[in-house]
Image (spheres, rainbow, N blue to C red):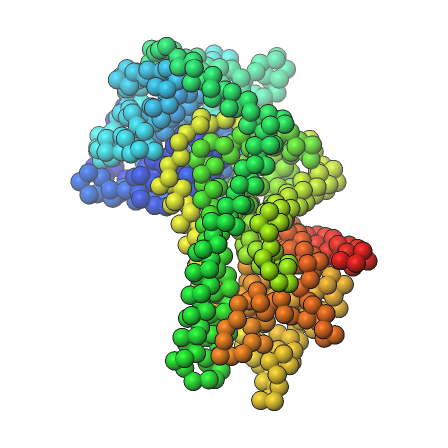
Amino acid sequence: MNLPVHLKTPTRAPVYALVGNPNCGKSTLFNGLTGLKQKVGNYPGVTVERKIGTAYSQHGQPMTLIDLPGTYSLAARSPDEAVTRDVLLGSRDDTQMPDRIVCIIDASNLERNLYLVNQIFDLGRPVILVVNMMDLATAAGLQIRIDRLEKDLGIPVIAAQASKGVGLIELKLTMSRVDLPLPKHRWDVPAAISASVAELQASLQNNDGKPPLIARAEALLLLTDQNPVRVAGSQPLSDRTSVILDQWEKRWNADGTDWSGSLVAARYDAIGILTANTVLQQETHGMRQSRLDRIDGIVTHEVWGWTVLGAIMSALFLSIFTLAELPMGLIESSVSALADWVKSQMAAGELRDLITDGAIAGVGGVVIFLPQILILFFFIGLLESTGYMARAAFIMDRLMNRVGLNGKSFIPLLSSYACAIPGIMATRTIEDPKDRLVTILVAPFMSCSARLPVYLLMIAALVPSGEVPIFTKVGLMLLMYGLGTCGAFGFAWLFKRTLLRGEPPPMIMELPPYRMPRIKDVFMQMIERGSLFLKRAGTIVLAISIVLWALTAYPNAGESATPAEQVAQSFAGQAGHAIEPIIKPLGFNWEIGIGLISSFAAREVFVSATSVVFNVEEDEENTAPLLQALRSATWPDGRPLFTPLVCLTLMVFYVFAMQCISTVAVVRRETNSWRWPLFQIGYQTGFAWLLCLVIYQSGTALGF
């Protein structure tokens, strides 16, 4: 077959699609080719959106790369898999159909990975096959005959180890070729199915306007998947094609023909012949495999697995408090020195107050927690890259089933510990629409990094004088994260038995091999997350801090008014007083109310808001630490405001309340409706208020 002219003599940058199973190293390869920053995980489903980058050939020519979501098959059963299918079929208006395809497969599991490759061959486009993770295949006692695989498939095949950059140069050289061949590997469609394929292909060509090869490929996919997923961007089938499909399915149902199973089996028959000539089994490393099996037996055990998970989480939080102490002190002293320097260089006045009490105090109050957030993301990246996260999802599957979900929902929930936004987006890997919606509704309960500054500030303020013991800090932090997790599971159980009733589907998840973590990737992820945190501090937090300062400074109460009187009579004070009757039963006063209102933009803004509100009472020539200001805050009758009970109640409120407008926007986009985000705001905030009411009133009655 002759190549299309534009592939022989390209007049524009060729467009490559990177396709592969989850956990095959596709994202690592994409990073290596383009240099773009992208999260690299070690569990299925980490890539839920396409990523586009530019790589350069050995001759300096640009090449466009589309990193598509990982999938096991083009017969899509979840929204992220549907994106891959639709881009390759040219069914999405927002993405150009790629000219060429780079298929990445796991060398240690060749047969399963080649199933997707076999489907891609049907598309009739040039393909480059990258056999990645060759080191894992060798460790498993497998020898892959790359030359034989290349001969049998008729396309370039490259052995690679993307995590170490092995094979990248060879891949770039191959991608630079103008004369890439088409695959010659063929497979036989079962005789009982072939007539239906031909009829559907003709209809897709004539009635749906599909090119011949695309029409045949889509006909095979329609017959492979009995419940094809259609998402935004997919082109609906014509009435004629739908009728043909329904007629064939009724005929096969009547005579007991398993058309979908027959097609899958035929593909695997062809793949089996291919791998029999390609993969040689050497003497296995039995001792190493036995050791890894023993480790898996512990970390996935129904008792010891939870013990390991608890120990890891305890070590994580202990590190957050101990390792971050020194850099946090340096940041705090630097912020204080900066404010004092500005005061020494500027004359007293509103502009100086805006800079010191608004911008510096507000942003500085949040930036001080950067070391702890960096440590959190470092540990998360470390656990992902070693392969442990998939084991955590496996042991959580038992618990998830009891609340009506399966282990696949745990991965988005786990991502929500970092930020609910990518966690909610990761629900696209969940096949069942009801399970996906329930996971979206409960994901914000998982304590994200934006809550961390609030928890840390309140834990530090628990003791009116002196230092909070380290194990008390760790215990309280574990309690907050545990409460959020229990809240997510509890409401998931409730929703699956009321609003979104349904049985959880069985979980099928690949446990990736254990690997030594790539420290470079872990640091890249940590720095990327830290940069996003600083960006929020330098934009959202800064803007809100300045606005909040203005709201506390105006209207001016006069020169004779004390700082406390000025705040009370300001616009911010008026807003705080307006909601005080609602929050006073929780132990919160109007000043805390200002922080609650402000933090709806972003939870960490509560810290900067309290910095602005409470620091205005300090001597203007001395910037006092926020913690000291909180410990000295009182009610009008002289009672301490931030008692241990109030600090605990406030932390619980932030565990459950929906205090993030960005999350609301993402839920609106993912559900395509305002119904669910508004419901989410109502039920989360309402439950937070009720629970805090019970905690505070009960604690007060018991004399705490």
Q: Is residue 312 above or below residue 357?
A: above
For residue 40, side relative to residue 435 (left or right): left
| Number of numbered callouts drawn | 0
Query: Which residue is pictured at 58% across the width and 67% down the height?
Result: 628
Q: Position of residue 85 (x, y in %)?
A: 45, 34
For residue 207, side relative to residue 615 (left or right): left
Query: Which residue is pictured at 75% across the width and 68% down the height?
Result: 581
Q: Is residue 606 above or below residue 446?
A: below
Q: Position of residue 97 (x, y in %)?
A: 37, 39
Q: Position of residue 584 (x, y in %)?
A: 74, 66
Query: Which residue is pictured at 55% across the width and 56% down the height?
Result: 453
Q: Is residue 260 above or below residue 652?
A: above
Closer to us: 623 or 429: 623
The answer to which quarter of the image holds residue 698 is bottom right
For residue 600, side relative to residue 498 (left or right): left
The answer to which quarter of the image holds residue 176 is top left
* Quadrant that contains the N terminus: top left
The answer to which quarter of the image holds residue 569 is bottom right
Q: Residue furthest right?
A: 701
Query: Which residue is pictured at 55% across the width and 27% down the height?
Result: 299
* Quadrant that contains the C terminus: bottom right
Residue 469 visible: yes
Closer to us: 308 or 76: 308
Q: Position of residue 140 (x, y in %)?
A: 39, 18
Closer to us: 163 or 71: 163
Residue 125 visible: no
Q: Residue furthest front?
A: 466
